Image (spheres, rainbow, N blue to C red):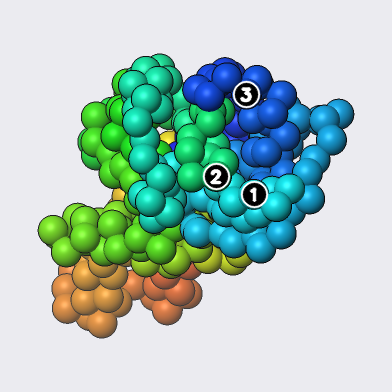
Amino acid sequence: MVFDKTGTLTVGRPSVAEIVDLAGVGEERILRVAATLESGSEHPLANAVIERAAGLARYELQGFEAFPGEGVRGKVDGKEAAIGNRKIMSRLGIAMDGAEAAAARLESEGKTVSLVALEGKIIGIIAMIDKPKPDAKEAVEELKKEGLEVYMLTGDNERVAKAICREIGIEKYFAEVSPGEKAQRISMLQSEGRVVAFVGDGINDAPALTQADVGIAIGSGTEIAKEAGGIILTRDDLLGVVSSIRLGRKTMNKIRQNMFWALAYNMAGIPIAAGVLYPYLTLRPEIAALAMSMSSVSVVSNSLLLKRYKEEH
């Protein structure tokens, strides 16, 4: 069972937890630069920055360019600026210098950091936190009881992924996975002989949902994710993932039971109806027809017992 992180295991509404001023320009300046850049983005982290900067005037933005899984760049008030992770800073040739220690501390606390750079220098860090859903830990525990391996996929780095997984109870994860690599990770697990279910909610989860043996889309997610999912949870409830697995297994058990009893019933009844035991035992045509009807009734009745599962949950 592989979970996407943002919006699936977590609430999906990150908020700014801390702002670190590395250049002495002031938190307001850092926020204004960040909010100006993020105004061109639709990422959840961008929304968190814009929400925190509400009421602050933005600068003029020119030459906006987005790098999926990395960040964005552009000219803010005529000056080159960027916001994102280490990858975009490396792409733009901007040194981490004193920012690394502060970023590492924040990430070890489970916070996602966005580095804010202006004129080739990192001026600050905006740390955001996206809390796990209340039922995430319980859902993971229940899936483990079902004998499933649980993984998490995230674009965050190793430290953030480890902190989130520790809180939820997941031991295995893939960190720093770009949106385009999610389906590749699912394929990699499949190549190892695993049957993989993937749970996601976002636009970039659609390829992974399609690639997985079982794609489970969160009902509160995007329409594209729901189109790609084989199972759609009608509520934003991770325990629904557990229920779907258990219901699927119970359904397969019912199918096996019905196949066994239908075969046994017919293997015993058809020879008798054909007269194999004549004259010791015979079946009148009307009795044989009734017996066949009872076979169908027993199979349907056994299947209807699945309704009890719904009542229990």
Q: Secondary structure at mark 1?
A: strand
Residue at position x 53%, y 40% from top? 117
State the residue position of label 1: 79
Residue 167 position, x and y percent, is 38, 19
Q: Secondary structure at mark 3?
A: loop
Q: Is residue 195 visible?
A: yes
Using a 10 Å C-alpha cutoff, classify the residue at mark 2 as few (fewer than 14 neighbours), some (14 to 19) or many (20 or more): some
Secondary structure beneath disc 2?
loop
Q: Residues within 10 Å of mark 3 (few under 14, many from 20)?
A: few
Residue that protrudes farthest toward the left in the picture: 192
On the image, numbered disc 3 is attached to which residue?
25
Say whether disc 1 or disc 3 marks the residue closer to the N-terminus.
3
Q: Is residue 248 visible?
A: no
* Quarter in which the C terminus is drawn: top right
Q: Position of residue 28 (x, y in %)?
A: 71, 24
For the N terminus, give its image quadrant. Answer: top left
Q: Amino acid at mark 3?
A: Val
The answer to which of marks 1 and 2 sits earlier in the sequence is 1
Which residue is labeled 2 in the image?
119
Residues at marks 1 and 2 touching, judged by CB atoms closer than 8 Å: yes
